[in-house]
Amino acid sequence: MSDFEVRVVETDLLICGGGMAACGAAVEAAWWARQHGLKVTLVDKAAMERSGAVAMGLSAINMYLDLNSGDNTLKDYVDYVRNDLMGIVREDLVANIARHVDSTVHLFEKWGLPIWKDQEGHYVHEGRWQLMINGESYKIIVAEAAKNALAEAGGQYFERVFITHPLMDGDRCVGAIGFSIRENKIYVFKAKATLVAMGGAVHVFKPRSTGEGFGRSWYPPFNSGASAFFTIYAGAEMTCQEVRFIPVRFKDAYGPVGAWFLLFKAIATNAAGQDYMVENAAELDKWDPYGHVKPVPANLRNWLMMLDVMDGKGPIYMQTADAIKRIAEQSPDEKTAKKKLKELEAEAWEDFLDMTISQAILWAATDVEPEVKPSEIMACDPYFIGSHSGASGAWVSGPPDLQTDATRSEYFWDYANMTTVGGLFAAGDASGASSHKFSSGSFTEGRIAAKSAVSYVVDHPAAPVVEPAQIEALKAEILKPLATFQAHREHTTDPDVNPNYIRPRQFMYRLQKIMDEYAGGVSSQFKTSGKLLEKGMELLGYLRADADLLAAENAHELMRCWENVHRMYQADAHMRALLFREETRWPGYYFRADKPDLDNKDWLAFCNCAYDRQSGSWTMIKRPVKYITGDSP
Amino acid sequence: MPSFVIASKCDGCKALDKTACQYICPNDLMVLNPQTMKAYNRDPSMCWECFNCVKICPTQAIEVRGYADFVPLGASVTAMRSSEDILWTVQFRGKGIRPKRFKFPTRRGVQEGKAQPFDLYPTGSDDLKSPTLMGEPAALNTEIGPIKLDKVPTL
């Protein structure tokens, strides 16, 4: 692969990723870098205007504190997140994002994002923390601001460059390496600080649809574990690797349910019309003190539904027609009711068209008129997403000014949002234990991390040192699948079936089968055990060895190879954390059949882990949960 | 099939400096066949049906056919996106249901390309070590909220 030229880019701050967190980082970094004469560079595997989880659009902003209304406090939000995650949360990180998120949302509006407003000029809330938007172009608008910010500060961005590995100088991260998926180039970014915001991970587990609908994951299939791999490989301590997220959505196309539950106040029932939240309410006692908080934690709502599914009481329905009828009945006369219904119909369809167009196709193809008949809902497959009701990501420092005497030594070191690796920062899905950031909070966390990273660069002005040998070794490793394919392709008449290599698609299927059957995927109804995990890890060991035999025909397939290596490391960390936590805490996300109970005495703690790339070994670390609100569990 | 390209409509973006669908696809699926100068989706089972290729295609050559492993045939959702709004048409499988049309705004008050990030609010501190982000504390407030935050709050 000698025809791959190496392009070296030197920068002060490198932002890896192009989604919401990365765009937030670009705007904020550009502002501070301009004042300090620093260079900011962003690198994205896709085109920024449509990259990341908001690529399709979004119908709501799910994190807005509205602090200046006086209706909510910071503590209200922190309490909500802590309870939703069954007590496992870094309150300092959540509060830090929450105290800045309103300013982010106000910027979005100034940049042209249409946020719904009522006649008095107040934002229209979908729920307490959620705002309704016309969000088809949400990502375009945000990316536009980010690109304009980089341009004003003399920064630079690269699109269609796929980052594979961190560059290291001893224990310090000094940039990243990857390759172009458009031309034969290896990119070496040397940076004084590196900010990782490359999203979560999808397709680690087998999805429900395995034909054409394979790609219809709830979270996008192009979020492939790049953040997790980058931080794991750099040696950063990781947290909440067991806290996957399983959303309940409209079945198969995974259209959003938020508007139906929150805005239209719809209820979901089993086939007999019974509300499982009422019928199965006694089960909540088992999960106290979190079983009786309001709102009921997302994973427990899942769990009460899953109990009905396992009892054969499905299909489970969102009762859309009842909800619409109830709203119409509240209108004073027929004319108002008709107008109201028309509005609701448009809102319901826009909810899908803004963010999950497949669901609109599915409704149209099955003749669903929501005012006439109900629609099925179902739990999706497991995802790794630190920004929603999951929590997986890197263990990062909190801000200094939100710590208490009890938390400072545990949760603060040097710079906010820096991982345990010097010069390596994380935000959005890349940082853990700070759930419920969603789009606005991820952008906000990107801002926080970027300002902090600029501060790090100012304090550490020395040029990054990257040994040429490291670059040569990584270049050879990165391009190896191309060489493997070329060396062996003539051996068989079908390039897909060849004993000398494995192509990334089959590699991914193997990974997904292991995770599905041993780590509590869809086909095992999200149930696992210590013994199953041990067997799964044994099989993952073979897969890991076979990763050396991955083969790629072209740059696109080379990206697929590395995406799946990234997923494999996420899977490895996940199984280790599932095994380490000897209890069941989030039954609607996964159930440890051999440890079926919540154990707050021993396991109200973070399960962290760290990887050593020299030895290939992992260390598991139990860290205390400490609350800055002063609340006790 | 998820996204598909109508052969008679695709001109390979010959007049543009780049192939629009190839430029935009977040999953690197849309490619141009240099022989036929027509684009195609190289891996439909990795398609998210995000419609970004549909929306960006200058000749409206791209549509989406629902995933055949769970979506019955016969329905369609089409999008026409302009710089300010988007027009959707939803056709049902059953002929008895009238097609639905929706028009939603996509941006408000700021022209395409003109989202200026800086100086919308004064920034209260130049100190890199302070928690004050660009535009704060002014940007934390709305014009109508009764409470005015004059610094970044703590718990």
Image: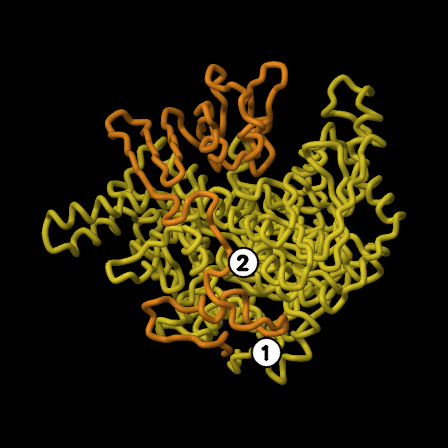
Chain colours: A yellow, B orange
Callout 1: few (<14), some (14-19), or many (20+) C-alpha neighbours within 10 Å? some
User: Marks 2 and 1, how far apart in space?
Assistant: 20 Å
Q: Does A63 appear above or below A510? A: below
Q: Amino acid at mark 2?
A: Ser
In the rendered structure, find residue A401 and report the number of the disc placed on it. 1
Q: Does A585 appear above or below B60? A: below
Whichever of callouts 2 and 1 sits on the residue coming sooner in the sequence is 1
What residue would you read off at disc 2? A442
> Is A402 left or right of A335, judged from the image as shown?
right
**Which residue is drawn at the image coordinates 60% and 26% (left, top)?**
B31
Q: Give the percent coordinates (x, y) of residue A269.
A: 34, 52
Q: Give the percent coordinates (x, y) of residue A531.
A: 69, 55
Q: Does A173 appear above or below A290? A: above
**Which residue is drawn at the image coordinates 59% and 23% (left, top)?**
B32
On the same chain, marks 2 and 1? The answer is: yes
Which residue, as the protein is rendered here, is positioned at the far right? A469
**Which residue is drawn at the image coordinates 38% and 53% (left, top)?**
A258
In the rendered structure, find residue A194 and report the number of the disc placed on it. none
Q: Nearer the viewer, residue A65 or B37?
A: B37
Q: Give the percent coordinates (x, y) of residue B140.
A: 44, 68
Where is residue A481, by image quadrant?
Answer: top right
Q: Nearer the viewer, residue A298 or A386?
A: A386
Q: Nearer the viewer, residue A533 or A558?
A: A558
> Is A126 left or right of B21, judged from the image as shown?
left
